[in-house]
Amino acid sequence: MAMLKIVENYKELRQNIGMLIKKSGYKNSFIAEKLGIPTPNFSVKKKRGSWTIEEVEKILGIIDNEELEDFYLGKIMEEVEKENEYMTLDEFKKGMGWK
């Protein structure tokens, strides 16, 4: 079951990359250039959430900062509360693959 949860978390992250990019303050054209894809293609991927694993890694490498992590952590915690599922911080970190 833990493996399925990891896959679910990844799918959710992939679908929410557009929101994270918007929250990060970076322009689409800047990130598209860093990824080496045309801005129109980037915009379509952002809208559809159709990122590859490599693109997700590169985008997170570009936009990663503590404020953005706190924002996403808050979103995850809201979902957990809605589902009435509670976990310790250590369980959460383990589930997210953090050490």
Image (tube, rainbow, N blue to C red):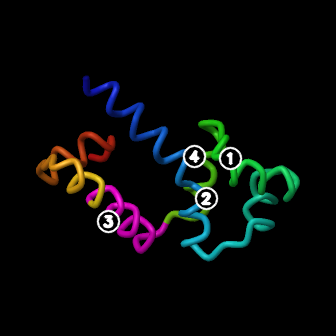
Please give the residue where the numbered disc 1 appears in the rendered image. 48
SS assignment at label 2: helix
Which residues are drawn in magenta? Answer: 65-77
SS assignment at label 4: helix
Please give the residue where the numbered disc 4 appears in the rendered image. 57
Give me the residue at 69% from left, 54% from top.
46
User: What kind of secondary structure does the magenta stretch mostly adopt?
Assistant: helix
Marks 4,2: beta carbons within 8 A:
no
- Is residue 76 inside the magenta stretch? yes
Task: Assess disc 1: are there few (<14), some (14-19) or many (≥20) residues with their C-alpha within 10 Å of its C-alpha.
Answer: few
Give me the residue at 54% from left, 72% from top.
23
Q: Which mark is residue 18?
A: 2
Kind of residue indicated by mark 4 = Glu
Observer-side mark, 4 or 3, equals 3
Kind of residue indicated by mark 1 = Arg
Q: Point out the tag, 4 or 3, that comes first from the N-terminus.
A: 4
Q: Point out the tag, 3 or 2, that comes first from the N-terminus.
A: 2
SS assignment at label 1: helix
Kind of residue indicated by mark 2 = Gly
5 or 96, nearer to the observer: 5
Q: Point out the tag, 1 or 2, that comes first from the N-terminus.
A: 2
Observer-side mark, 1 or 4, equals 1
Measure the C-alpha gap from mark 1 to mark 3.
23 Å
